Image: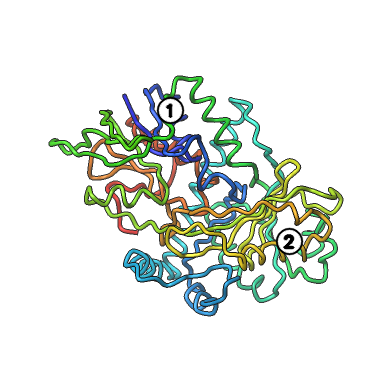
Amino acid sequence: MKIVVLGAGVTGITTAWYLRKAGHEVTVIERREGPGLETSFANGGQISVSHAEPWANPRAPLQILRWLGREDAPLLFRLRADWQQWRWGFAFLRQCTPTRLRDNIRQLVALGNYSRDALKALRLETGIQYDQQIRGILHFYTSPEAWRAAQHAAQLMRDAGCTLESKSVEECIAIEPALAPQRNRIAGGSYSPDDESGDAHGFTVELAARCAALGVSFRFGTAVDKLLPGRNGNIASLKLRLADNSTEQLDFESFVVCLGVSSAALLRNLGITLRIYPVKGYSVTLPISDPRLTFSVSLTDDEHKLVYSRLGERLRIAGTAEFTGYDTTLTPARCDAILRRVSELFPGATDFNRALLWAGLRPATPSNLPYIGGTRYRNLWLNTGHGTLGWTQACGAGAALAERISGRWPALDFRFCDPVPGH
């Protein structure tokens, strides 16, 4: 089958890989000059099945109200005259029930486990390198209240099949000795030994090269303008906008949307509503100054909504969530909050004068569940809305969707969007 994949982030590239391996003729369209240059570029680096607790949980509404107006808040809603934001917000509140929390965690764990296994198989097959660390993820807490509050979701994740071991302070330090100076500040932790970390951008670039070697075609510097429906319940063609502002129309047998935060706007004209809203996340990349003071196990600082990964000779600290439309401007207070936290926990480990700051837009759904599957158009498919878990879910989502498009059902207990549900 002749298939076009729209978007060359980590989700688009993994989708292209698995479709090509299934024998399809694949073209990838990307408006940027290369793969992985937007949300995949400088994310937190974690392959984290243990991040299966959605933002939408029974504690979230009160927590968000407490954080309103705080520039350094881990989760910040900047209320705007934007009906898409308000509609997304009301859908988010509907997900903040114990029943929906349990169901969403179950699905996120299932997809995360499936995806991590797919990544391991891909790595074994290709030998791909991307500064990966196969040492698990340690969640630590510096507030006893936050530690106690986290236990309910942790048990739900265990019940769903996530390996998540409760750890004492001394056990946390044994796993990551760089935390030893903070012994008196740590309240407890949990450890997911099967989780991983690695450079999502490096992986995306390397896998794109392998895709090209297998015959996948790439069109960079080319924006998707419109999908054009036919008369038989299918999408007939794709209208592109080129760098010189001219247009081009191409025909394919199937179309796969992997456009992240741009997915909803593209599909709106087709009568398809996706509950996707951009959530700005920040990251800081720092050189290692003293390896003796530096963490090597990937960490999650749950109270501050930060993740820490070691990528070769670099440290990547990423997180926070800012609902502020499509603006990617760096807010100094939020960058400073990340740097301050790193300085508190790991003094002397890095040179803060050489910090590389970045912000990107995550395609978030109210439930944190992505859109993977079909639509009302028989040849239009979705793989988008992965929020903060795009790197974690990329291989599994791509592999599962390639199975669906090829007429098979993957061995995955996940609620595919056929047709697209309202999240």
**Hey, which residue is sitting farthest left in the picture?**
231
Instruction: Indicate left or right for 210 with 375 as reference.
Output: right
Quadrant into which the C terminus falls: bottom left
Quadrant into which the N terminus falls: top left
Residue 327: x and y in percent read 46, 59
Q: Tell me which residue sits at (49%, 78%) in the image.
A: 65
- Residue type beneath disc 2: Val
Residue 401: x and y in percent read 39, 37
Instruction: Indicate left or right for 198 with 279 as reference.
Output: right
Q: Give the camera-side residue of 157 and 93.
A: 93
Residue 206: x and y in percent read 58, 30
- Residue type beneath disc 1: Phe
Q: Tell me which residue sits at (43%, 28%) in the image.
A: 218
Q: Name the mark on residue 218.
A: 1
Residue marked by disc 2: 342
State the scheme by which the image is colored: rainbow
| Whether residue 289 is situated above or below residue 190 in the rendered picture | above
Among numbered discs 2 and 1, the one appearing first in the sequence:
1
| Whether residue 409 is situated above or below residue 294 in the rendered picture | above
Q: Give the camera-side residue of 392 and 147.
A: 392
Disc 1: CA contacts within 10 A as few (<14), some (14-19) or many (>=20): many
* Picture quadrant where residue 255 is located: top left
Mark 2 and mark 1: span between their CA atoms? 39 Å
The kind of secondary structure element at disc 1 is: strand
Whether label 2 touches label 1, CB < 8 Å:
no
| Whether residue 371 is situated above or below residue 8 in the rendered picture | below
The kind of secondary structure element at disc 2 is: helix
